[in-house]
Structures are given as structure tokens and as C-alpha cells.
Image (cartoon, rainbow, N blue to C red):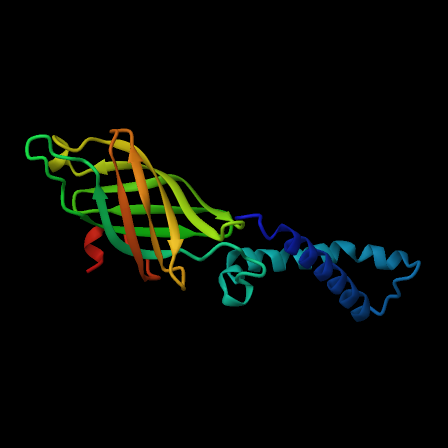
Amino acid sequence: MNKSNAKTYIWVIVISTIAIWAAVLLVFEIELTGSVEALKKLPLVVTIETGIWLVFTQWAWKQNFFQSWLVAEPILEGTWKGTLKSTWVNPETGGDPDPIPIVFSIKQDFYNISCSIYTQESSSHSYFGRIYIDESNDVKRFIYTYTNKPKASVRHRSEYHDGSANLRIIGGSQNKMEGDYWTTRKSTGDIEIEFVQKKLVSSFSEVE
């Protein structure tokens, strides 16, 4: 989770703790000033706040109400579709390959983000993922590193490899991403994808 809103989080925690403690004391009819009984209720306050935090990190943080002012990261979870365009040039013809249709399935929770990437010939799964926010330039990026596994039928010309990509999150609704990738096969290229649906997929054929 991006920490750019850390100060806001701290203020929310402080204010909510005071509010919960005051509510507990009111319910139990305990006076705060010089009261040992008030201090004894602090464990209950912590328990309540922990429960609220669990609800927030499991579900509430994705709601529109918390976006921007509390949660800085865009919600990318879902299925995305687009193209991958390699910069590779065929040494025999001098031509470059056609864009490859590609499907992204992005999983995201409060702490982590990961993606699976599918083409007609291979599948990739990330082992590192992060949303990077450059506040000074108002730029948000999805950065990930992955392992690619080609289908057995194409391994004679497409071997296992690792790679990384840096995609800029664009569009008024932050529903598009574009950027580049590079791999351990010394290949590079461009990626352009657009959000399709919230439902996650596990293969290329699941998206029309």
C-alpha cells in the first residue's frame, strides 16, 4: 500500500481512537478525568479499533468514499485486455511482428498487488508488483516482475524467461495503462491495455 497518505492515516487513527474511547466511556458511564476505570477500558477500545481496521483493509478501502483523500492507490483489480508490441526485428525479412493480443488478470488487496498475463501461446505470473505514485508529477504506475511459461507447442522458438514492465495508469477513470517491458531474452516492447471487467479470468480464451 502506498504511504503517500500516511499523515491522513495517522490523523484518522488518532481521531477515531479518541472518538471510540469517548463512546465507550459514555456507554459505561465512566468519567475520564482521573479515572482508573477509564484506563481499564483501553483494551476494549483497541479491540474495537482492530475490528474496524480489519473491515477497512479487507473491504472498505476499495469503496469510492475513501479514494483520493485516504487511499491514494487506484483500484486496478479485474481483467484488462490489450496488445503487446515487440521491438524485435526479423533479421531475414527486416519486418517486425504484428501486435499480440494480451489479457491481464490483476489481483489487489490493501497490502499487495499481483497479475497473471495470458496470450494465445503463453502465460505469465508476477512475483513482484507495486503501484508507484509520483505526486510531484501526478503520475501513477503499475510496476511488476514476472516469469513467462510458453506452451509446450511453441517452446522450440519461445523459451521460459523472466521480465519486468512499467505501465503508466492513464485515462480519466484510470481505466487504461500503457508502457514498456523488457525480458531476460534481451527483448523489449510496448504494452497497451484497457479495463474490461471486475471478474478475474485464468486463461486467454475467457475474454472475447
Q: Quadrant of residue 157?
A: top left
Q: Is residue 62 above or below residue 112?
A: below
Q: Residue at x 60, y 53 (%)?
A: 5
User: x%, y% of residue 78?
Assistant: 35, 57
Residue at the right extreme of this rendering? 34
Looking at the image, residue 99 sits to the left or right of residue 174; the answer is left
User: x%, y% of residue 98?
Assistant: 14, 46
Q: Residue at x 51, y 52 (%)?
A: 110
Looking at the image, residue 31 sits to the left or right of residue 56; the answer is right
User: x%, y% of residue 49?
Assistant: 67, 58
Looking at the image, residue 41 sits to the left or right of residue 156; the answer is right
Q: Is residue 73 above or below residue 30?
A: above
Looking at the image, residue 54 sits to the left or right of residue 147; the answer is right
User: x%, y% of residue 133?
Assistant: 49, 48
Of residue 195 and residue 44, the one placed in the foreground of this image is 195
Q: Residue at x 29, y 33 (%)?
A: 183
Residue at the left extreme of this rendering? 93
Q: Residue at x 11, y 34 (%)?
A: 90
Q: Is residue 150 above or below residue 186?
A: below
